[in-house]
Image (spheres, rainbow, N blue to C red):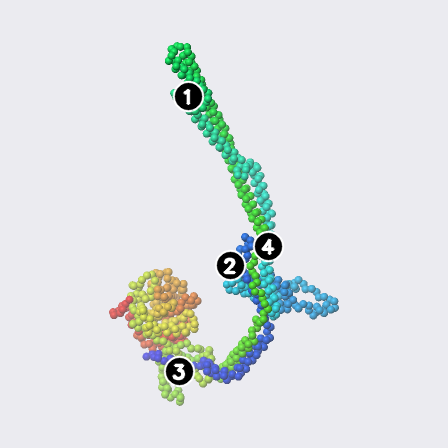
Amino acid sequence: MLDYSQPIDRAAPEATQRKPQAGFNVLELANLLWRRKVAITAAALLGATLAVTIGKSITPRYTATAQLYVDPRELQLVDRELTPRAQDVSGMSMVVESQARLITSNSVLLQVIQQAGLEKDPEFGGGEGTSLTSSLLGLIGLHPRAPSAAQKKEVQLAALDALNKHITVRKTEKSFIVDVEVWSTDPAKAAMLANTLTSAYLAESRNSQASAARRATNDLSSRLKELRDRLRNAETALATYKAQNNFVGTQDALISDQQLSASNQRLSAARAATMDAQARLDQIEASRRTAADAGAIPEALQSPTIANLRAQYADARKKYAEQASELGPRHPALRQTEKQVEDLKRTINEEIDRFTQAAKNDLTRARDFEASLNRALEAQKRQSVQLSQAAVRLRELEREVDASRDVYQSFLKRSRETEEQESLNTSAARVIGEATVPQRRSFPPAMSLFAMIGFIFGAIAASGWFVAAELLLVGATTPAPSPARRERTPAPQPPTAAEPPRTAELTQPQPISRAPEVAQAPPELAAPPLQPSMVERPVIEKPLIARFQEADVIHTLGAILATGQSVDLTRLGWPTLRPGFALTALLNAWRDMREAASRRAGGKAMPVIALVSPGESSGRSVIALNFALAAARDGARVLMIDADHQARSLSNKVIRLGRTEPSKLGWLSIGSKAAREIKTVNGVSVLPAAEADAGKAAAAIRKAITQARSAAGYDLVILDGPAMPLSAGGRKLLDDTDSLVAVLPTDLDINDSLEEILAALGPAERKLVGVVLDELAPEIQTRQRGKQYA
């Protein structure tokens, strides 16, 4: 039987008692340094002395700091500013940063150089006035040639570059405060340069505002003449057009419009008079046609003549009545009175006839007047239509005149405003802290710090030298160990006097020598031991063992109970972990395997674990699936890849359910349309096997692992395979994995199975972190009695 109770030793049993020595241990390192303590202390003191000497030789620097308050909200001195102010916080911050950058602009620094005379300062690349040669030439009456403009420009640029390196501008976080730091070898000069720089910046800010206002005024003034001429031409064209088309009138309306309105009113009055005369004539004629008294019309009643005649007529009728009662019908007096009555009646009728004729004359005159007014109105209408057609062009000319006038007035007003703004300073920037002469240097730091740094570096350098010398000495006296070839059965060793009882054990094959090993450093990369007498033996860490039993799983009926449109890995028809049991021995062992794999990964964010088994076994796929579900149950984002392109047990199960879900296909793929990432409801993404040969399939899987690791979308990658025996592509795939887990079916001899796996893995057996004993019956895929199904 295979026993995993002890670590596996690839060499003889006595080697297990000797720990491999890859270099110094802590105790030997401490002993070595203690033996060399005097030399190390002397080197540390020498380093401190050299550091202090170097610090003393460095020219000190003094930094002076001036503080500026740069408020982007400028003073509101006029209604309209040339430049809009920043309103939001981000805009204000950008304005402050721009102003901070303006402090170190060439225009400001050139003013500082000119005011401070830095062209002659040696610290900033200038000369010290007159040189020795100039002085000697002056003694004999010769004066050196004045420097040319190009030379002056070169000196000025050198001073500009040096001054720029001496200045540091810092903006205080979340404020409008800007710190201007200037360093120099002279503290007074540093303070003077900082204050000069702030003054030059404020002056430059004012000059830039005045220059902007001056440019705006000049641009506006240059346009005023053209706008004035355009307005004059438009007004002249309008006046000429009005005169040509008889557009004469008051400010409110044209004369033609006024005449048309008056004619319309007069025509309405004439029509009313005509209708009145017609009504009066109709009334008179109607009175005459009827038997009624003709003198009952309003005109007759108002006429004094008719009234007098009617009074006489009444008196004559009265007299006739009196005489008729006294005299006979042929009496001359009666006949005379009767004639008088007839004459009065005829006279009244004649007077009524005159009223009728007068009414007819009034009606005729009213009709003639109405007709004349109507003709005049029609003529005025025709003239108004002609004027309306001409008014289209008139209104166009008027709009052009109004537009030209508005633009001209706007430019004229704005020109006067910008002209006044040249003399106004709207900047809110000011100095809130002038630079003072610094009392302490800013560089180099204190000599105590130099001494401490030199002391530490001297001690470290001496210690490193002694350790390197000791390693070289040991390497020269100890032969390098040759790489030992892994053998399944250790070779017999001759008995020694020190170990006579273990001779028989050493000559017998050890079954535990076939157990998995952990990764060990190659001999050529390991450091030689301090003691040549100690022989290095490879020791393999004990792998973890887990038992996969019937009590840990529950059987399902496959896709019959699958719900929804998503893939559920617990509905593939394979036995899966029972839900609700988080502290079983199997789950705890698998957690330990994952932790060991994370340690083997060397800090990688996504370790890769491959499950291998002897031969073609569907039990490996079942255990790989449950291994992934256990990791997902613990909150890990798991990517499961089918690395067995021959059997494709997992791929055939998952693709059958995932083909109807194109929306579940993820971004990850290994080259074919059918082998795309399939999301599941269990927190596990499955990447099916590619339909290609072994080499191309392995290369596609390695590429997919690289993509997943760069995207950082998963915490763990589990490979189902590759299948045994390993192909060339499978071996390359195992080289990219961090850990291996062997699946051993218990229906076969587990020692033979493990021997087969170790023989196939070769050097990759060092990555083995665990062994899973598959104790499920081979007929788990068929429905059985006494089983519990979900």
Q: Mark 4 Cα within 10 Å, few/some/many (few <14, many 20+)?
A: some
Gap in angstroms between the C-alphas marked 2 and 1: 101 Å
Mark 3 or 2, nearer chain start: 3
Q: Residue 571 at x, y = what percent?
A: 31, 65
Q: Name the residue under label 4.
A: 422
Q: Name the residue under label 2.
A: 91
| Quadrant where the image shows the N terminus | bottom left
Q: Which amino acid does label 1 sit on?
A: Ala
Mark 2 or 1, nearer chain start: 2
Gap in angstroms between the C-alphas marked 4 and 1: 98 Å
Q: What residue type is labelled 2?
A: Gly
Q: Which residue is drawn at 63% across and 66% down?
A: 118
Q: Which amino acid does label 3 sit on?
A: Thr
Q: Residue 618 at x, y = what percent?
A: 33, 70
Q: Is mark 1 on a helix, strand or loop?
A: helix
Q: Do the residues labelled 3 and 2 touch (CB within 8 Å)?
A: no
Gap in angstroms between the C-alphas marked 1 and 3: 163 Å
Q: Name the residue under label 3.
A: 16
Q: Is residue 491 above or below residue 559?
A: below
